[in-house]
Amino acid sequence: MTGIVSQEAVDSRAAMPDFARARVLVVGDVMLDRYWFGDVDRISPEAPVPVVKVVRSEERPGGAANVARNAAALGAQTELLAVVGDDEAGTSLQQLVDGAGVVSSLRRDKTISTTVKLRVLSRQQQLLRIDFENVPSREVLAEKMAGFLARLSTVDVVVLSDYGKGALADVATMIAAARAAGKPVLVDPKGDDYTPYRGATVLTPNRAELRQVVGRWIDEHDLEQRAQALRVRLELDALLLTRSEEGMTLFTAAGVMHETARAREVYDVSGAGDTVIATLSSALASGCALGQAMHVANVAAGIVVGKLGTAVVHREELRLSLLQD
């Protein structure tokens, strides 16, 4: 994919990809996002904290599961390979991803609990988040690797969604295997060392994540120098930096492309990175050039940040937004 930022990609920016052609494999850390919604009308007599009277609750797939359901919502043929605990949360997550049209293979690990992020909200504002998480066992990860290798011949693109929970302990092996099979690999990275992602097709860090690796930049020229140096050092075809209200910037051997943010109103940026990599990978798998795929992903990001919590962009609302853009 190196050097595919072309005039053709720019001219076809408004085109809606044929997502039904796309076969996407998503692998990584999955979690169950739980939301408790309530009202606050008093402070606790036990401590200076608000008392939330919970009136309703919701559950949504999070992490790599949210990436998968975003791809499926666009119409891509989506598979999800991940590890969960042998518990109630794992069962709930299985039901949610199956209901979203994702073909899932969630390996049950009896030694861990499913990762759960519990958010308490009042009047559309998050008051508290509580995390429950464990690292999967090596035995279950080995089973997952076997499943990964078996699926490579049946997909067009691989997405590795790293939330630092241990499901991608063998990420370097996965990238090497996928590239050897001729499959583009897109990675949503985590941590301050990107060495394990060497050889990936595209990395999609946000600003805070990239700063952890390359340090703070003083201006756009400095950013370009640092980003391009990292891309070359890691042997990446491209690095896509998501920049929240500043849009996103694509760094390739052919140069730099920038997309301004499309959000009209921003309610919640949680999960926006999931939408970006899901849309980008689905567009690439449907035959789009990288420049066009980036534009489509940017438009999708502008839609999803207007929704509360981890959410998806559906094919029809994306089509309308592309027409209006």
Image: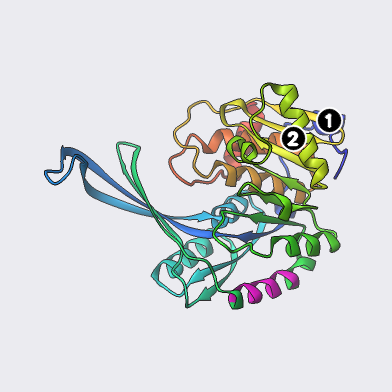
Magenta stretch holds residue 122: no
- Amino acid at pointer 1: Gly
User: Left or right: 31 with respect to 222?
Assistant: left
> Going 68% across and 55% down the picture, which residue do you hit?
159
Secondary structure mostly seen in magenta is helix
Mark 1 neighbour density, 10 Å: few (under 14) some (14–19) many (20 or more): few
SS type, badge 2: helix
* Quadrant (top left/top right/bottom left/bottom right) for the N terminus: top right
Mark 2 neighbour density, 10 Å: few (under 14) some (14–19) many (20 or more): many
One can see residue 289 in this view: no
The tag earlier along the polypeptide, 2 or 1, is: 2
For label 2, the residue is 227
For label 1, the residue is 255
- Seen from the viewer's position, the closer of residues 157 and 135 is 135
| Span highlighted in magenta in the image | 140-149
One can see residue 130 in this view: yes
In the image, residue 83 lies at what x, y percent?
A: 55, 68
In the image, residue 13 lies at what x, y percent?
A: 75, 32
> Going 75% across and 22% down the picture, which residue do you hit?
221
Location of residue 309 by image quarter: top left
